[in-house]
Image (spheres, helix red, strand yellow):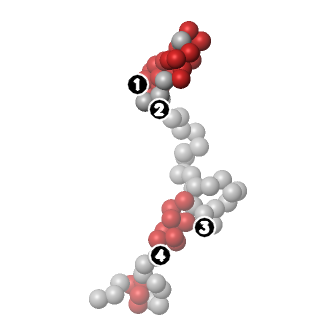
Amino acid sequence: MPGPAADEGKVPFRTAKEEIRVGLGVEGSEGGGGGREKPGARGRRQDIAWRNVFLLSLLHLGAVYSLALIPKAQPLTLLWDD
């Protein structure tokens, strides 16, 4: 039994590309900003995931520390490969 959209001569389903375009706000978007904003979303603040900030800071500090150790390595260590 077809739904009300099929009764009016409209296509009841969209193709995957049409769904993606509508979901991204490509059709009818104003200002070329990409996606659609929710009403009242302009003034909202984003929550900071402090755990992620801490872990990424540790990761970057470790990377800087490893770069500082490179000049101290022996030449054969630098040539070593798995």
Residue at 43% over, 30% down: 82
Horizontal and vertical percent for residue 65? 53, 14
First in sequence: mark 3 vs mark 1: 3
Horizontal and vertical percent for residue 15? 47, 75
The circle drawn on residue 47 is 2
> In this rendering, which labeled residue sits more in front, label 3 or label 4?
4
- Residue found at the far left of this picture: 1
Horizontal and vertical percent for residue 45? 53, 34
Number of numbered discs overlaid on the protein picture:
4
Q: How much space separates mark 1 and mark 4, taking CA atoms?
A: 40 Å
Residue at 63% over, 66% down: 28
Question: Residue under circle 1?
Answer: 51
Amino acid at dot 2: Asp
Up/down of 48 relative to 73, above or below: below
Residue at 39% over, 84% down: 4
Amino acid at dot 4: Thr
Asked if disc 1 and disc 4 are in contact, CB closer than 8 Å, the reply is no
> In this rendering, which labeled residue sits more in front, label 2 or label 1?
1
Question: Residue under circle 3?
Answer: 27
Amino acid at dot 3: Glu
Quarter of the image where the N terminus is located? bottom left
First in sequence: mark 3 vs mark 4: 4
Q: In the structure shown, which secondary structural element does the residue marked by tag 4 occupy?
A: loop
